[in-house]
Image (cartoon, grey):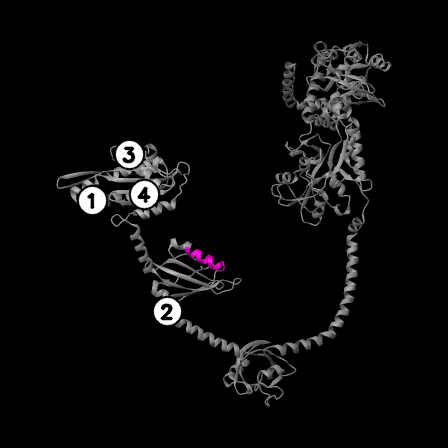
Amino acid sequence: MGNRHFFINAALFCSVLLCLLNLGMQPAYAATPRTVRVGLNPLAQFTRIENEKPSGYLPDHLEQLARYTGWNIKYVVLENWTACQHALDTGKIDLAAPALHSAERAQRYLYCAYPAGTSYTAILAPNDSPVIYDDLEALAKLRVGVVPNPIWISDFATFMKQRGAAMPTMVEYSSRENVREAMRKGEVDATLDSVLALQNSEKILAKCKLTPFYYITSPKNTQLMQELELAMVQLKMEQPDLEYRLGRQYLPRMYHTPLTRSELAYIAQLPALRVGYDPDRKPYSWKDPATGTVRGILPDMLRDAATRSGLEFSFTPYRSPSPNFVDSFTKNDLDMALGSFPASALHACKNYRLTAPLARANLNIFSKPDATLTQLSTFVLAVPATLHKGSTYASNMFPYATIRLLPNEEACLTVASRREVDAILGSSMVVNNLTNSPRFSEFNPVTGYTDIEEARLAMRPDMPEVLQGILNNLLLTIDEKNRTQIISSNIAAATTPPTLADIVYEHRSLLIVIAELLIFVSALVAYALYLRRKSIYNQIASDQRLAHIADNINGGVISISSQPPLRILDANNGFWQLLGYDADKPQTSNFIELLHAEDTKKLLDTIAEPHEGPRTTTLELRLRHKTGIWLPLLLRGTFSENTAVSASIDCVVVDITEQKRMQEELEQEKERYRILLEQSQDIFFDVDTEKRQFRCSPNFLLKFGREATPLFNEKGRPNNRQIVHPEDLPALNELRRRIRSGKPTAFAVMRIPTAEGRYIWCRVQATRISKPDTPLRLVGKIVDIDEEVRRRAELERRTQRDNLTDLLNKTAFREKICAAMPVRPQGEKTDALLFLDLDNFKLINDTFGHVKGDAALLTASDVLKRVFRNADAVGRFGGDEFCVFVRDITREALEERAEALLAGLHTFVEQDGQRVEITTSIGIYLFDGTEASYDLALHRADNAQYHAKQAGKNCYRFYDEVPDPWMSEMDDDGSNLANEESSR
């Protein structure tokens, strides 16, 4: 069989090449069409005669082949397959089918290299047979009728042997018709035949073997077979699924696998399956408001499966418009859920399993006709939540689109109709139902993109796989007529009559026009009444308002002539009261007589300036009060030209006596402030963040030799350049933070640079004078404390440093280490304590004197500073003893430092022919977190140094490398060590 398949594949490849090389031969075939006689024996739905015309799988397949061969097909109806073989042997027909392959037949006939389809050898029985599918134990007890066909018998025997079942009683008959007659009479219980012969009154008890069938011809018809094979190659290339489609059309039950005994037993004990569905997604599924039952294509598909299997389903609507069946599975609310999935984006998921599809529909982009969209366009796309993981799918398919997730297709169409999105992604089945409504009738699918939406059952992941297999079998084997009937009836039922909203929407233009006309007429009438009433009250209100305004301003209103002597045309009571007059107004009516002489010229010059049309001016003038004093007033007037009367100036006069007094006091205050700043030794500054201003007293220039640096840059942000020493920026920022956080006064000590680059220690005091919710405003002073700081630093240095080497003394060193304790090692790094002294140092003092000894100590301190220039602390303990505390160092790095120290301190002191060698002995303690105190750590370093001396000097030892005989005598708190240390 394997060699034959290899031969078939090789022949298929060669035939493709032959097809390409012989395309020019086709016109010749067409010019002289060959008439080919094909034997046709009626065989159930596979081949049948209707109205004296052949139909079925074989005639449709030959019709497609004839498009490539150019043959005229002539069918010769024969009684059975034996008659077909005889007609082929005698030359009455040219082709016969369906022929199973056998070695004996291959010697008699010429087989087409490519099969025309596939078939099963099967056990067929009447529909009322009590035996169920694949029950081999019951099958072995049957009487099976069979025609003398060695291929079927061999296939069935092999099948039963492989399954370990006994062969039933086989009864041989001369023809298929005799077997059927015997089965109707009860002489046999079933028949062994090809599944192609399955009739509507029969069912399948067992499928033995899937076997291809072929066209055969007489060996002398070689040219005929070559034409057939060439056409078969072309047909398989252009219509690779033709055989499957014809099989589903004419032999649908061949693809059905009936339920087995174990499957039926499993179904019998299974409770009703809880299925979640969308209650408002016509025509897929919806809840009937009248009866409360679930309707739709998908529920009816499941009801059909239930009828054929005995399964029971209970339907539960989703609680939210955006179903999330994964959550329902987690809470065990549902066993299954009906959902929609993009066919091109199906992926395995641990949270659910999917069955075979219940229904398929196109997945399209819908938009209004004026939209021009492609998959690479930039647009806003509405995606319904009813499409599982639809937003992820849409993001992948339309990378430049902005995705907006909505509950369902109707919500998507609603926002699209309002132009809030450009298009929607939706199922053609659902959207086509919605577009029956006038509200959405203008939406059409966008060309250039389409996909398939599959409605499937999502199962809880813990549901048995056998149930999934049963459901897949039932869903895949649903009768096509039933499927078509279910879909068409639910589409018709989902179509609802137009509602009032639809009618209003359909005639919205006319209704809008009518409404606009009614509103316009009503508004016109109302406006006319309003204007009439308003005209009556406006005059009264205007007069009252003007009188109130004029009486309540801090001044008066006056109208004067623009020609000298500036006659007063009109003035209110406020103006005369401003000048001290009540009822007794002055005798004069000329404004110029009330003016100060110096201001008269200023006003006349202003009036004389050339201008066109109305002009407004503002002047400060002095008018004579009734008491004789001159009142400072602000006059703001508008020059108006009136052809009926002379030109006038309409003015508002405001008393500014108080403002003048406050201005004079402010000038005096500024002068006093300036004098105080100049006479004070301190430096004062003023900061206004709202105006971005920084002012400083002149003493800053005298003190620092330069102008003060502004606190803000040109963009209004805080400026840190050249204000203080870089190390003091944290102190400056802290000062700013305290002021901004609400503290009224803050202090800071920092170094401020001079023009020569020298830094002066200063104390800066800043006081906030603005309210918390207003822009920051503060004043402060800068006090020179440089000498005080330097004296304090020198005093501190003297108390903490050794006078000879300038290293830390014993007390300061101890405080430094105690501040760093306790120590916590970090990986390979930890802190270390080195204790060392100079070997032979006493010999130097005894031989050369203390001057040479001090020089040797200075040299040693320089070496320590050089080797440990990054160390936290280096101290001298007196005499020739030194101690070093190093932070965050590994043992290897410490060994390198110790070697460098040994090399650097190894020297000779010579004088007058005498020579003394100086070396050092070093004890090293690595902190491990067990040391209870500084004294304990120092003791451990001292113990290590002792062993270094015992080892011959000029070396180093780690504490963990030597024994500590005194540890048992120590207190837990290291008090013995403290006493020993104090005695050193």
Residue 888, horizontal then vertical, whole percent: 38, 40
Residue 867, horizontal then vertical, whole percent: 30, 41
**Among the 4 quarters of the image, the one containing residue 238:** top right
Camera-side mark, 2 or 4: 4
Tell me the crowding category of disc 4: few under 14, some 14 to 19, or many 20 or more residues within 10 angstroms, Cα based.
Answer: few
In this view of the protein, can residue 743 be seen by the observer? Answer: yes
Q: Which mark is residue 853?
A: 1
Q: Main secondary structure of the magenta part?
A: helix
Secondary structure of residue under mark 4: helix
Does residue 733 belong to the magenta stretch?
A: yes
Disc 3 vs disc 2: Cβ atoms closer than 8 Å?
no
**Among the 4 quarters of the image, the one containing residue 792:** bottom left
Real-space CA distance between mark 1 and mark 2, rounded to the nearest whole angstrom: 55 Å
161 lies above or below 663: above
Tell me the crowding category of disc 2: few under 14, some 14 to 19, or many 20 or more residues within 10 angstroms, Cα based.
Answer: few
Residue matched to label 3? 947
> Which stretch did the figure color magenta?
731-742
Residue matched to label 4? 979
Secondary structure of residue under mark 2: loop
Residue matched to label 2? 680
Secondary structure of residue under mark 1: helix
